[in-house]
């Protein structure tokens, strides 16, 4: 199964770039991984936000392959434990899902069209988190999930 992360915006801090690079490298031992960064749209003023979010949404939707299982990160989504995420990942690996696409919106959130396209709305926390930190947390949890599936000693319960 191929894993694709669609992310709005670039990582601005060196510690985030380093952390994401570490977990991307580790994840590639388990799954083919592609991380795509889409250009973050700038709103001239607050009134432009709905249009900005809509443009980012259109760009995200255009990058999702037909037939992919789509997981959209959203604080209103379903929360899973690390074991729960590992179980879902393993189920899709076993049943032959060709590609998992995970979507992380930009600083202003996601369009309703992107949320509607999701097969799963996933929450890492009920709190609102910066999208750049979400990327690092998600990569770590995906790596953790792969080690749980393989019963490797990274995850301690």
Image (spheres, grey):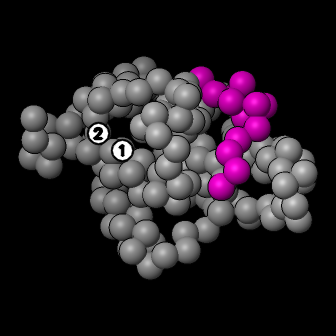
Residue 94 occupies quadrant: top left
Q: Which residue was labeled with disc 2?
A: 145
Marks 1 & 2, CB-CB < 8 Å contact = yes
Direction from residue 118 to residue 125 in the image, left or right: left
Residue drawn at x 64%, y 48% is 105
Q: Residues within 10 Å of mark 1 (few under 14, many from 20)?
A: many
**Is residue 144 covered in magenta?**
no
Mark 1 and mark 2: Cα distance apart in space: 5 Å
State the image quarter where residue 25 is shown. bottom left
Which of the pair 86/127 is nearer the observer?
A: 127
Relative to 128, is 35 above or below?
A: below
Q: Which residue is mark 1?
A: 142
Q: Please state the horizontal and vertical placement of residue 5, each as a whole percent of the image.
A: 55, 50
Q: Which element is circle 1 on?
A: helix
Residue 113 within the segment the image draws in magenta: yes
Query: From the viewer's perspective, is 75 left or right of 15?
Result: right
Callout 2: SS: helix
Toward which corner of the image does residue 142 lie, by quadrant?
A: top left
Q: Position of residue 31 (x, y in %)?
A: 39, 47
Range covered by the magenta-colored residues: 107-119
**Of residues 99 and 74, which is closer to you in this image?**
74
Q: Is residue 125 above or below residue 38?
A: above
- Whether residue 2 is visible, yes or no, is no
Q: Residue furthest front?
A: 46
Which of the two residues, 98 or 133, is positioned nearer the viewer here?
Answer: 133
Query: Circle 2: is it few (<14), some (14-19), or many (20+) Cα within 10 Å?
Result: many
């Amino acid at each position: 199964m191929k894993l694709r992360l669609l992310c709005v915006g670039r990582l601005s801090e060196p510690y985030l770039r380093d952390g994401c690079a570490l977990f991307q490298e580790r994840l590639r031992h388990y799954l083919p991984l592609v991380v795509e960064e889409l250009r973050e749209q700038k709103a001239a003023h607050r009134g432009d936000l709905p249009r900005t979010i809509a443009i980012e949404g259109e760009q995200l939707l255009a990058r999702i392959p037909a037939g992919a299982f789509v997981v959209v990160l959203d604080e209103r989504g379903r929360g899973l434990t690390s074991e729960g995420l590992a179980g879902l990942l393993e189920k899709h690996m076993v049943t032959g899902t060709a590609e998992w696409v995970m979507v992380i919106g930009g600083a202003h959130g996601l369009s309703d069209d992107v949320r509607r396209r999701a097969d799963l709305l996933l929450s890492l926390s009920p709190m609102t988190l910066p999208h750049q930190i979400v990327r690092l947390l998600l990569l770590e949890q995906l790596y953790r999930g792969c080690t749980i599936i393989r019963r490797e000693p990274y995850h301690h319960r």
